[in-house]
Amino acid sequence: MKRYTLIFLALLTTIFPKIVVADVVQNIDASLDALEAAVASKPADVEALQQQLKPQLDDYSQQQKIRFWVLNSVYHIYQSDYNSALEILNQAEALSPTNSMLTSIYLYKATALIGLNAFSQALDVMERNLSRIESLDDVQLKASSYIRLAALFLEMEAWEEIETYANQALRLNNRQNPRNHCYGLLYIAVAKLKKDQLNSAYQQFNDSMNYCHDNNFMMIEAMSLKGIGDVELKRGNVESSIIFLEKALQAYEPFQYQIEINHIHSLLAMAYNRLGKPQQAQYYADLVIAAPSHGINLQYQKDAYKVLAALSQQQGQFESAYNYLNRYQEISENLHNETKAKAYAYQLAKFDNVEKTREIKMLNQDRALYTAQQKVMELQRYKESMALLVALGCSVFFIIFGATMFLQKRKYKRVSELDQLTGIFNRGTGQDLAENLFIDVIARQGKFSVVMFDLDNFKAINDTLGHGTGDWALKHVAQVVRPLLKSRDLFVRMGGEEFALFLPDADADVALNMAEQCRAAIEAINTKPHYSDLVITASFGVTTNIDTDLSLDPMMKRADIAMYQAKLQGRNCVVEYQETMSMIAAIA
Ligand SMILES: Nc1nc2c(ncn2[C@@H]2O[C@H](COP(=O)(O)OP(=O)(O)OP(=O)(O)O)[C@@H](O)[C@H]2O)c(=O)[nH]1
């Protein structure tokens, strides 16, 4: 049994919640309570109890089964049968234990592994448990788990870790659970004593002694008393040391905690020897030597042999002094080697573990770096695709914008080219287009005719029926003329109530025919539904190109003269231009 295993196992009662549900459950729990008590204090009864309980296992709930197996494993740990303990704990772990029970299973596993000096594996288990503990939401469960972890580090004599986890537990526990607080204070005190921080160790033991006394944790109070006695002895306050050690001895009486009692005996032997009280020193030293010579007892027996050697020397019994010293030397060497081996194994395991942690940390850093790089690349890709998207969007926008602009422009161009009232070409555009058409025709030496017409008495329409009626008439004139034209013919509103037709490839007959058709169509406009008194007619002047015509100007002039002639002839008629008409026009 390792030095502090008993302290750790003393925590056992914290791990099993007492469940009171039904009679059967209660009976099973009561049996398990009995087994637990036997494991802790009556090892002789354990096997019999186990044989009694095993046949009923089928009636157990899952958690009761787990409790049974864990108690079983603890018994094996007490018996130093660590391999069996590990086997049973693996069995219990596979049964889906609760969080609290799983913490116990891990810690008992670590205890068993420490027992086997498998420090690296023990640390592994403890690490695994630690990461589990850290993710627990239940603060109390977390605090209890830290306390048990500190107890396990006590077993490994890892003083720094004890302080770390005990402090952690105290902080989380926040004095809520007196047991956790009590054990936390004790562990910190032991760590300080082992680190030779005697003043703070004294203070800490004092705190744990008072607190544990007030909260009825008598065994921890007894351990604290022993701790103070130990500190006082180391500080040279021998009388005070004896007072505390005697008190501790008394406090341990009810528990019959033999290993602890042996320790106190060895401390008292040393204290009385230093105080110059050989009889008492001899008495306590003999008690220690009488205890079984194994495990932690050897540590105490070593100290006792040293005291006995000193006492023999004082009494002049040099031979026995020599023998005691030899024994002392022998145990010292063994313990030293064991301690050295243990410290070496532990440091190695710790180093391995630190290395592993460092490696994991590095791997995590690499992973973080890789993830960051991926993110940057993703961002880059995102940016690129965004840029592409924006470029594409811009292109689409500009295409749409361009097309819209083009259409708008075309629309405005057309609007600007057209007469708004009638929808046919206005004078400017119509004349330009007609010029091009004319050039094209004369280039081919073809015929080109111009027809000009003007609505008759339009002023009267406006004056009598209003401008609206005038507009209506203008629109309907355009409407009836347009369908009569060929595709290349141009229909132009020259201004007011005057229109022109530019007819490519049309000789005089074609043009006259066209003019006549238009005239008839205008005259035929049905005005009745709207304006009963309205009659719309137009006078037409027609001319066709001659060899001297190099542009439309002279032709338009001639068509205009012919149209004037049509007005003169009584309106609503078609007149072809004649040479003589120029002279009449000139006279007029
Ligand atoms: N309702 C309307 N009237 C217009 C428009 N443009 C010009 N006019 C009118 O057309 C009339 C032209 O009158 P005149 O030049 O005297 O000729 P007319 O009355 O047709 O007489 P004749 O040509 O001799 O038959 C004027 O009263 C103008 O105001 C227009 O877009 N709408």
Image (spheres, grey):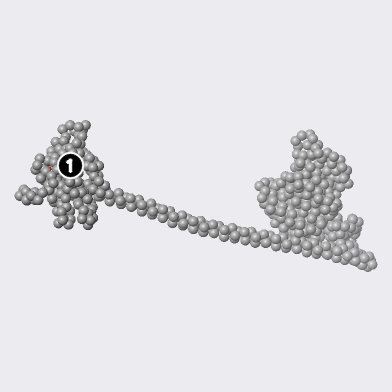
Q: Residue 266 appears in which quarter of the rendering?
A: bottom right
The answer to whether one can see residue 471 in this image is: no
Q: Residue 553 appears in which quarter of the rendering?
A: bottom left
In the rendered view of the protein, which quadrant contains the N terminus?
Answer: bottom right
Residue 415 percent location from the top left of the image: 27, 48
Residue 139 percent location from the top left of the image: 67, 47
The kind of residue tagged 1 is Glu
Residue 10 versus residue 51: which sits nearer the camera? 51
Name which residue lies at 23% across and 42% down: 484
Q: Number of callouts in the render?
A: 1
Q: Is residue 267 left or right of residue 96?
A: right
Q: Read off the residue under disc 1.
A: 516
Residue 337 percent location from the top left of the image: 83, 64
The answer to whether one can see residue 457 in this image is: yes
Residue 456 versus residue 348: which sits nearer the camera? 456
Residue 375 percent location from the top left of the image: 55, 57
Name which residue lies at 78% across and 49% down: 90
Q: Is residue 278 left or right of residue 215?
A: right
Name which residue lies at 14% across and 36% down: 464
Residue 81 versus residue 387: which sits nearer the camera? 387
Q: How many C-alpha atoms fall within 10 Å of the one at disc 1: few (<14), some, or many (≥20)?
A: some
Relative to 330, residue 398 above or below: above
Name which residue lies at 72% across and 52% down: 129
Q: Which residue in the rendered view is the most extreme toward the left?
A: 587
SS under mark 1: helix
Relative to 273, residue 438 above or below: above
Residue 291 versus residue 517: which sits nearer the camera? 517
